[in-house]
């Protein structure tokens, strides 16, 4: 598979050549969880209840993703900058430190998650009725923690070397397997929710095998190595904290939303939020791929002291993200039934979800500005700004709004879904404008030096 050459200065082409395989890979990665929900929602007689219960596992899945992103997205920009500077030895040390951090953390999450699963689910808003479905799903899902963290966390390093297509195939194998195995375990073997989790773990294991084969092959120029030392761990964690916070704050938001919805409307509204979150994951994926495809291009050219190319990459990334989110917002507004029916055919649940969907995605286009600003801050190693704006939109805005709007402003369940667009508007603009004010003068100074 042909390697992308980040040094050739063809910015638009390099972003697309990196972003498209990543988009394909991320869409397939979504299938691990999204396909589970699609099939679970169609289990005869218990689909709606099971869907809501599995939605209560969502915060734990987000936490796993948060740690994965901390070490993967925290290490890969540093790795790419060192490649731009020609520091091959340091680049390899950064990659291997990220690997060790991923493995250690996966082990800790597995042990703690298995030991305290019931308490964790109750914290997330589960009652005894939901535990019947949520507990077996979570306990089985946790068994694949190492597989998922390695395959997903090490993928950015494959992309940073220019092998975006290989990164795509590491995910493809597992996603296709999950698509095939889910109906077999859920319906043919009559294993229900537990079958969905088993299919996911097997599929994650296959992705791990394919990813591991690349890192131990001759195509990989930076062989992996286990060891006790963790050089550059502080730098990786510092930069990756922004990605971690973005995911963990999503988990906090999910917990707050589920608890408020249970209080204001009941378990059926948790099922609605599960559907909304699933749709958001699908629609977020392309704009995230645009950002992640742009990140190594920005990092490499920044490390190589090419400010004009960095500026051009930021412009291309932003225009692509805004254009995509605008089109998706129009489609959601015009065809809500198309999106909701992917996950449920229950007429009552669909009717509840339509209004929630309109409210939730009202300011979706401004979310692309948040992604653009965050991507630039992370790609240039500006961890303080990246961390602040991760906290600002979710912790400072969404969580308080989720708790205040339903009761204090008398909006009920509508208030839970309105918190997201308000934060997208204010947080997205604040992050993007701050990025321009901080980064553009620095690039100008670099150009004049």
Image (cartoon, helix red, strand yellow):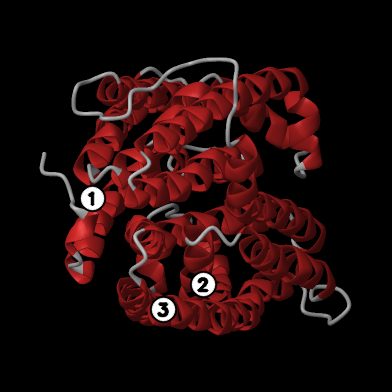
* Closer to the camera in the image, 347 or 252: 252
- Mark before the other along the chain sequence, 2 or 1: 1
Residue found at x 51% / y 41%: 47
Query: Residue 300: where, in percent of width, then height?
Result: 34, 56
SS of the residue at dot 1? Answer: helix
Q: Residues within 10 Å of mark 3 (few under 14, many from 20)?
A: some
Q: Which of pointers 2 and 3 lies earlier in the amino acid sequence?
A: 3
User: Residue beneath label 1, please?
Assistant: 21
Res. 381 image quadrant: bottom right
Q: Residue at x 44, y 36 (%)?
A: 90
Q: Which residue is mark 3?
A: 329
Q: Mark 3, mark 1: which one is toward the viewer?
A: 1
Give the CA distance from mark 2 to mark 3.
20 Å
Q: Can residue 62 be seen from the camera position used here? A: no
Instruction: Find disc 2 in the rendering and name its residue.
Output: 373
Q: How many marks?
A: 3
**Mark seen at residue 8:** none
Say which of 78 and 15 sits in front.
78
Marks 2 and 3: CB-CB under 8 Å?
Answer: no
- Give coordinates of residue 443: x percent, y percent: 45, 77
């Amino acid at each position: 598979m042909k390697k992308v050459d980040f040094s050739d200065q063809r910015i638009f082409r390099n972003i697309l050549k990196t972003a498209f395989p990543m988009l394909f890979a991320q869409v397939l990665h979504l299938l691990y969880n999204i396909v589970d929900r699609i099939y679970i929602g169609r289990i005869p007689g218990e689909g709606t209840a099971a869907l809501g219960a599995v939605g209560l596992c969502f915060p734990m899945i987000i936490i796993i993703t948060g740690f994965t992103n901390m070490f993967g997205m925290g290490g890969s920009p540093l790795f790419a900058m060192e490649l731009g500077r020609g520091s091959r030895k340091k680049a390899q040390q950064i990659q291997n430190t990220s690997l060790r951090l991923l493995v250690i953390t996966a082990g800790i999450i597995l042990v703690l998650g298995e030991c305290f699963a019931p308490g964790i689910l109750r914290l997330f808003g589960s009652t005894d009725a939901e535990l019947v479905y949520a507990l077996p799903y979570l306990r089985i899902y946790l068994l694949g923690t190492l597989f998922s963290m390695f395959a997903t966390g090490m993928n950015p390093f494959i992309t940073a070397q220019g092998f975006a297509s290989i990164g795509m195939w590491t995910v493809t194998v597992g996603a296709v397997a999950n698509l095939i195995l889910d109906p077999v375990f859920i319906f043919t073997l009559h294993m229900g929710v537990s079958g969905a989790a088993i299919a996911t773990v097997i599929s994650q294991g296959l992705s791990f095998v394919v990813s591991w084969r690349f890192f131990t092959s001759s195509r990989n120029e930076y062989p992996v190595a286990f060891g006790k030392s963790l050089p550059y761990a502080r730098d990786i964690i510092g930069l990756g904290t922004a990605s971690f916070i973005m995911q963990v704050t999503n988990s906090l938001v999910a917990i707050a939303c589920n608890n408020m919805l249970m209080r204001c409307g009941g378990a059926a509204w948790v099922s609605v939020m599960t559907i909304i979150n699933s749709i958001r994951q699908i629609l977020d994926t392309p704009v995230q791929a645009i950002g992640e495809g742009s990140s190594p291009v920005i990092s490499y050219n920044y490390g190589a002291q090419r400010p004009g190319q960095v500026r051009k990459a930021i412009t291309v990334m932003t225009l692509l993200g805004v254009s995509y989110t605008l089109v998706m917002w129009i489609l959601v507004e015009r065809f809500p039934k198309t999106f909701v029916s992917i996950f449920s055919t229950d007429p009552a649940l669909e009717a509840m979800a339509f209004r929630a969907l309109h409210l939730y995605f009202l300011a979706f286009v401004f979310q692309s500005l948040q992604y653009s600003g965050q991507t630039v801050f992370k790609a240039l190693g500006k961890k303080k700004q990246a961390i602040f704006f991760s906290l600002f939109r979710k912790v400072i805005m969404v969580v308080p709004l989720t708790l205040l709007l339903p009761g204090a402003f008398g909006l009920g369940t509508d208030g839970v879904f309105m918190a997201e667009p308000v934060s997208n508007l204010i947080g997205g603009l604040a992050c993007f404008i701050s990025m321009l004010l901080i980064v553009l003068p620095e690039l100008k100074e670099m150009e004049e030096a």
